[in-house]
Amino acid sequence: MTADRTPVLDRDDARRLLAAVAALLYERRHTELQGGNVSLRMGDEVVITPTRASDRWGWRLAPEETLVMDFAGAVLAGDATKVSRETTLHLWLYRDFPEVGSVFHLHQAEALGAVAAGRWPAGVVTRSAEPYGAPLVVLESGLPAQTEAHDGRVAALLAQVPRADGAISMSPGHGLVSVARDVETNIRTVEVFRQRLRLERLRARLRSAAAAGGAK
Amino acid sequence: MSALTPQTPVGEALVTIFRRLFECDFVTLDGFAISCRTPDGARYLDESDAVVRMLMGEPAVDRAAPVDPAALTLHEAVYRAWPEAGCAVSGRPLHLQAILAEGAALPGPTSMLRKRGIVDLRDHLVDPAALRAPAIDGAIARARAIAVDHGMKHVLIVATDGIVFAAAPTPEETLGHFQNVAFAARMECIRVEEAALVERKG
């Protein structure tokens, strides 16, 4: 468990922080150039990346290119023509879960590869922080993204697990949605999740290599 | 970002060490702590605030303890036992975790390890229980003795669950010890995989 240490932010600092977090998540390859959105809650407002932050900006946004919205979806600052379709899911999660202070939708290759391989069954995989560093839920295949059915299922599954210390929802073929009490904890959630997946794969590779005579 | 020197202010040194280890994937946000000694006691940076401090450029001089009590025990012990200790890092490098979890051989000494007086990582290996009080004092004394035998000033402990603990008089030296172990483990994993490829081709 981590304490809430994200500094109290005004709107400008929150936009600056979100732009920096978006760039970091890309630099760390938690996402790629064809989608994803990240956001944080700031009191009664949400700061969120605009549509096509990935392919148009390469995740390198100026703070003023982020959007500030209320929970009803009205744009309070930023370009109102740049609202992403994914915003609906972010606002849904903030409304349903008052303890959630940050939402990421990422195209993390390790997680997408694992879910595509059928690593986990649909439903609640784990409610505890072990073995993936956070509770994990998996959506059924075939739910089209950016629909009410998809977003409602993400919210319904996440409702079944603790969320403040970080939780992850996997949408097969689409991406990862992570939530946490603050942006710091959310970054930690996706970092640790990926680290645990990498560790499992690395161990399997070492076993395989050792069996092939590589440990000599 | 300026160079890491003994004159680097504590808050900046903490963030710089984190940034360098994080950028190289030698630590992730899964149980690490970095500390520097100050006249008012040690100051810490850990996974609970490191990323935002790094991104927002805020000095991390306001933390007198890490979130994890086990890390506090470890870091406090080295400052208490060894007055010259100026900086300490504890963390869990991915490749070392994998090697130890699989029961594979620890990496052999690289020139980088030898340069810092590490001739056999097995000498530094301890049971995880040795990192808890009161056993930690003995583990630190043993690690200090190994370093002194090789004319060095540092503490390096590797627990069998993958935790690496390094301490030295300066942040630069501490960073060097920690990253050398993490890098050697990464190299060893690649060596094992490459050797398997050679074996298959042969």
Image: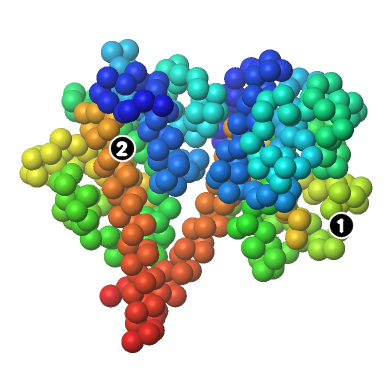
Image-quadrant location for residue B165: top left
* Nearest the eye: B85 or B8: B8
* Nearest the eye: B79 or A143: A143
| Parent chain of label 1 | A
The extreme bottom residue here reads B202
Which numbered circle lies on residue B175?
Answer: 2
- Image position, residue A214 (x, y; %): 34, 75
- Image position, residue A27 (x, y; %): 56, 43
Residue at image point 61% right, 48% down: A30
- Image position, residue A49 (x, y; %): 74, 34
Secondary structure at numbered mark 2: helix
- Identify which amino acid the numbered label 1 is placed on: Pro
- Image position, residue A191 (x, y; %): 56, 45
| Callouts 1 and 2 close, C-beta under 8 Å | no
The answer to whether residue A74 is above or below residue B196 is above
Residue at image point 40% right, 56% down: B95
> Where is the N terminus of chain B found, in terms of image quarters?
top left
Left or right placement of residue B120 versus residue B39 in this view: left
The extreme top residue here reads B40
Badge 1: few (under 14), some or many (20 or more) residues near its Cα, within 10 Å? Answer: some
Q: Can residue A162 be seen in this view?
A: no
The extreme front residue here reads A56
Residue at image point 36% right, 39% down: B90
Q: Mark 1 points at which residue?
A: A144
- Identify which amino acid the numbered label 2 is placed on: Leu
Image-quadrant location for residue A190: top right
Residue at image point 20% right, 57% down: B109
The answer to whether residue B199 is above or below residue B26 is below
